[in-house]
Image: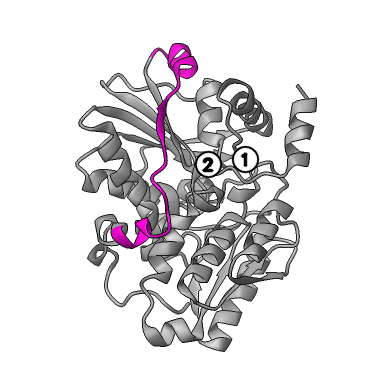
Amino acid sequence: MTGYPAGPFTETSSADVREVVSRHARVTPLLSAPVLSERLGREVLLKLECLQATGSFKVRGAAARLESLGPEEVLRGVVACSSGNHGRAVSYVAERTGIPARVFVPEWVDPVKLDGIRSGGAEAVLTGSTFDEAEVAAIQEAENTGSTYVSAYDDPWVINGQGTIGLELADQLAGRPISAFLAPLSGGGLIAGVSGGLKEAGLTPSIVAVSAERAAVMHSSIEAGQPIELPEEDTLANALAGGIGLENRYSFNLVRERVDQYIKVSEEGISDAIRFSLTHLNLVVEGGGVVALAALLNGSWKPPDTEGVVVVLLSGGNVAMETLMTILDCE
């Protein structure tokens, strides 16, 4: 792949990219959730990246990566592959920075996310019946054109961009202790980045990575001790679908080093969490964005004995109305 920085991962940090990320991403709320705190017997705070620009945390990583390009790289443009949210973020930042962009998406991409990609500065290219097929085509396109490939999860700039959530959390907590941080797990860029950002800020909570049962390639790879491939399955958490790359350079090792606990949640649990978000929290959260909440609601995760609040990341809110109506009708 093209476009990686020459030095090791540790030469960049979330603090290094925070200023450029702030040009494109907003500071999202950290809100108390009394209904969840009562259930858990511990104060629960929700980090609402579902209210982020473009509807997900992905704008942070896209901003960090695109803002790092040199003049010649800007002229050659960027290529990305996405199940939707990363592509929408790349398109948004590309338009704001004047960088040509093409985003490859699988044929099953959520129409809301496809519209978001097309409304920004990128060309959307539908190809392949799976995310992995679309990613192969995107990487080949980048190599053929000399463009920078912007990985959704396995790029140091992208990972550190997501890590600005951790720095932001530290500011919002204002010295309050945090015992646990729960976030979705897919390609690993989000949880690797945020855990790193928290550590930069001097916070070391238990890091809990939550996968959808039908989109658990990273989870299974950690169990196997190396990146593996799994068949792609239909899931409400389609933002978490796809592989991590057999030649994964960064996110696999960072997840293995930084995550303390792994949990998988069912489709039923995801559906229940989407309904709970709508009816009890007044929030629209997509399937991939709600898996951490699902682990708390179904009791598959229990808080540690250590003192401090529990922070749950709701990572995205881009979901088709038809999907929401179907879930609500199933109640």
Q: Nearer the viewer, residue 138 or 216?
A: 138
**Residue indicated by mark 2:** 50
Is residue 39 toward the left or the right of residue 234 in the image? left
Q: Position of residue 203 (x, y in %)?
A: 23, 38
Q: Is residue 269 above or below residue 94?
A: above
For discs 1 and 2, the disc positioned in front in the rendered view: 2
Of pointers 1 and 2, the one earlier in the residue sequence: 2
Residue drawn 46% across the image and 64% down it:
248
Q: Kindly identify which numbered label has been placed on residue 205.
A: none
The answer, for residue 316, to whether it is visible in the render is yes
Q: Which residues are magenta?
A: 19-41
Is residue 331 toward the left or the right of residue 32 in the image? right
Q: Position of residue 119 (x, y in %)?
A: 65, 63
Q: Quadrant of residue 204?
A: top left
Q: Nearer the viewer, residue 294 or 121?
A: 121
Q: Secondary structure at mark 1?
A: loop
Q: Residue 20 magenta-drawn?
A: yes
Q: Badge 2: how crowded within 10 Å, few (<14), some, or many (20+)?
A: many
Q: Is residue 62 above or below residue 222?
A: below
Residue drawn 66% across the image and 26% down it:
275
**Residue indicated by mark 1:** 286
